[in-house]
Image (spheres, rainbow, N blue to C red):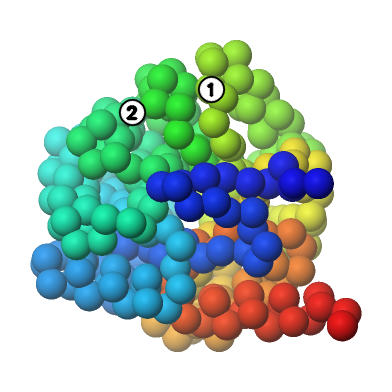
Amino acid sequence: MKSIKNIVLRENFFDFCPPIVMAIINITPDSFFSESRCSEEKTIIERAEKAINEGAKILDIGGYSTRPNADFVSEEEEIRRVCWALEIIRKNFQEIPISIDTFSAKVAEIAVNQYDVDMINDISGGMFDENMLLTVAKINRPYVLTHTKGTPQNMQQMTDYEDLTADILKYFSEKTEELRNLGFTSDIILDVGFGFAKTTEQNYQLMRELSVFECFNAPILVGVSRKSMIYNVLGTTPQNALNGTTALHTVALLNGANILRTHDVKEAIETVKIIEKLKTKN
């Protein structure tokens, strides 16, 4: 029997056996991990080529840093950044599925209509732009539904919950119903939003309880790569948080993650391979 956790991107069928890796391509001057920033055509091509060769199945392109306390970026500037990058990637890598990392309906629509982007990765769950869910329903391509509260500028002051996991389960249920009522029939991928309106302790609680979200029979995306929930615990920096990232990727995979969104594709792919071997009984 075919799993419900299937998506098709650019005629590529993914059943998440094994889980897949999404590579981060940041077109931002202020991303928290400085080595992920791409500001030249050569850098974008090299980063994308390296990620694809190492096994990434999706490239996630973002022009607005969503780290806590990130600088505000106008919609016009975000459009300029992502269109420039998408033009380069589509010219050089026609077959790789592309995700657009944006909470702007206009950016999402341009990315799909002009560059045939395959997936929308919205960290706001449609809350930062009142037109986003309507646009997502109209576009009707796979959508990453992320949990957060507030904005990148104030989210870390909005970490109060009655019951963290139950509140997020309710959020996903309500947002999924809203999307379906708008006529959205494509795939919904769930992201609990590690680092978005959560304390370090709350992030680790969600990691422990990640398998709870399998009740939706939707793919689960995990984005913890080099985040503060790792480097603050280790007393280090994003540049030195790869080992901690791999440790959490291991836990995430054991708890049901289907997509790892990461800066470091090779290491994530190796983690997937080890966990798949661990699960093999013969």
50 or 68: which is nearer to us?
50
- Residue where numbered disc 1 is placed: 184
3 or 143: which is nearer to us?
3
| Percent of width and height locating residue 191 | 59, 48
Q: Could you tell which of marks 1 and 2 lies nearer the N-terminus?
A: 2
Is there a contact, CB below 8 Å, between mark 1 and mark 2? no
**Residue sitting at x 41%, y 71%:** 263
In the image, taking residue 71 as reference, residue 132 lies left or right, namely right
**Residue sitting at x 51%, y 82%:** 267
In the image, taking residue 190 as reference, residue 92 lies left or right, namely left
Which residue type does callout 2 highlight? Ala
Task: Answer whether residue 8 is visible to the viewer in this image.
Answer: yes
124 or 71: which is nearer to us?
124
| Percent of width and height locating residue 249 | 63, 72
Mark 1: secondary structure: loop
Front label number (1 vs 2): 1
Q: Is residue 124 above or below residue 227?
A: above
Tell me the crowding category of disc 1: few under 14, some 14 to 19, or many 20 or more residues within 10 angstroms, Cα based.
many
Task: Answer whether residue 71 is visible to the viewer in this image.
Answer: no
**Residue sitting at x 18%, y 40%:** 79
- Residue at the limit of the structure toward the right, as seen here: 281
Which residue type does callout 1 highlight? Phe
Report how far apart the C-alphas of labels 1 and 2 lie in the structure.
Answer: 15 Å
Mark 2: secondary structure: helix
| Percent of width and height locating residue 121 | 44, 44
- Residue where numbered disc 2 is placed: 105
1 or 62: which is nearer to us?
1
- Quadrant location, the C terminus: bottom right
**Residue sitting at x 22%, y 53%:** 90
In the image, taking residue 245 as reference, residue 133 lies left or right, namely left
In the image, taking residue 194 as reference, residue 100 lies left or right, namely left
Q: Is residue 147 above or below residue 194?
A: above
